[in-house]
Image (spheres, grey):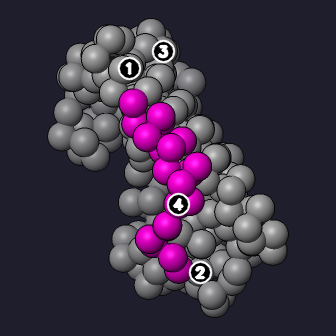
């Protein structure tokens, strides 16, 4: 659930700040809000079941990230994405493009062309910054999208495959199993 909330956050300034400052020291009022957030999630986990529980926790986590970003923006009005170097800027741009196009485009060349770089350079940069290939990052984002549909909707696996542009649902199922170790149906059943 957290991974899908992570990928939906559009402001890379938040991730840049958290990367540079991994420990946040909340004020007393912020601590009270975090306690309320924790209590709310605990209530959801104890009183709601199935896909609705997963959706509520996911939304609550997303809201927490937005609240943190809002507070940071007040204390740090100049909080923006800071380019550490060209490689960091390219991978951040790649992540943004993935969040927009992963439903229809899964070819590394498409993303490299969008950024006016070669696929070899994108591969080198992703390996340097994240330690994985661009194709692995595409598959990870696609897996998050599939997980979101499986937990937040009642769509069939076939409908999800069609929505994500897979010509053959069995190919999506094989890719999902390779990434998660579970079939889409096993993942859905485990999530409820």
Which quarter of the figure is the N terminus placed in?
A: top left
Q: Earlier in the sequence, mark 4 or mark 3?
A: 4
- State the residue position of label 2: 88
Q: Residue 63 in the image: x percent, y percent?
A: 59, 38
Q: CA distance from mark 2 to mark 1?
A: 37 Å
* Residue 187 to residue 124: above or below: above
* Lower position in the chain sequence, tag 3 or tag 1: 1
Would residue 92 appear left or right of 138 to someone viewing this image?
Answer: right
Taking 51 as reference, is 138 left or right?
right
**Does 106 appear above or below 176?**
below
Residues at circles 2 and 1 in contact by the CB criterion of under 8 Å: no
Q: Tag on residue 44?
A: 1
Residue at the image point whose x is 31% and y is 22% from the top = 45
Q: Is residue 32 magenta?
A: yes
SS assignment at label 3: loop
Looking at the image, tell me whether mark 1 or mark 4 is earlier in sequence order.
4
Which residue matches tag 3? 153
**Marks 4/3: CA distance?**
35 Å
For this rendering, which residue is in front, 140 or 34? 34
Residue 26: image tag: 4
Along the polypeptide, which appears first: circle 2 or circle 1?
1
């Amino acid at each position: 659930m957290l991974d899908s909330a992570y990928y939906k956050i559009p402001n890379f300034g938040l991730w840049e700040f958290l990367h540079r400052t991994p420990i946040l020291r909340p004020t007393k009022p912020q601590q009270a809000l975090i306690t309320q957030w924790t209590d709310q999630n605990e209530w959801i986990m104890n009183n709601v079941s199935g896909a609705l529980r997963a959706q509520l926790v996911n939304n609550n986590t997303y809201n927490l990230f937005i609240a943190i970003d809002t507070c940071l923006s007040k204390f740090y009005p100049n909080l923006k994405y800071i380019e550490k170097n060209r490689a960091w800027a390219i991978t951040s741009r790649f992540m943004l493009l993935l969040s927009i196009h992963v439903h229809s485009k899964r070819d590394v060349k498409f993303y490299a062309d969008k950024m006016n770089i070669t696929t070899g350079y994108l591969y080198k940069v992703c390996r340097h910054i994240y330690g994985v290939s661009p194709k692995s990052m595409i598959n990870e984002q696609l897996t998050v999208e599939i997980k979101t549909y499986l937990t937040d909707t009642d769509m069939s696996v076939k409908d999800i495959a069609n929505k994500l542009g897979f010509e053959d649902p069995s190919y999506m199922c094989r890719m999902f199993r390779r990434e998660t170790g579970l079939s889409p149906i096993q993942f859905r059943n485990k999530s409820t």
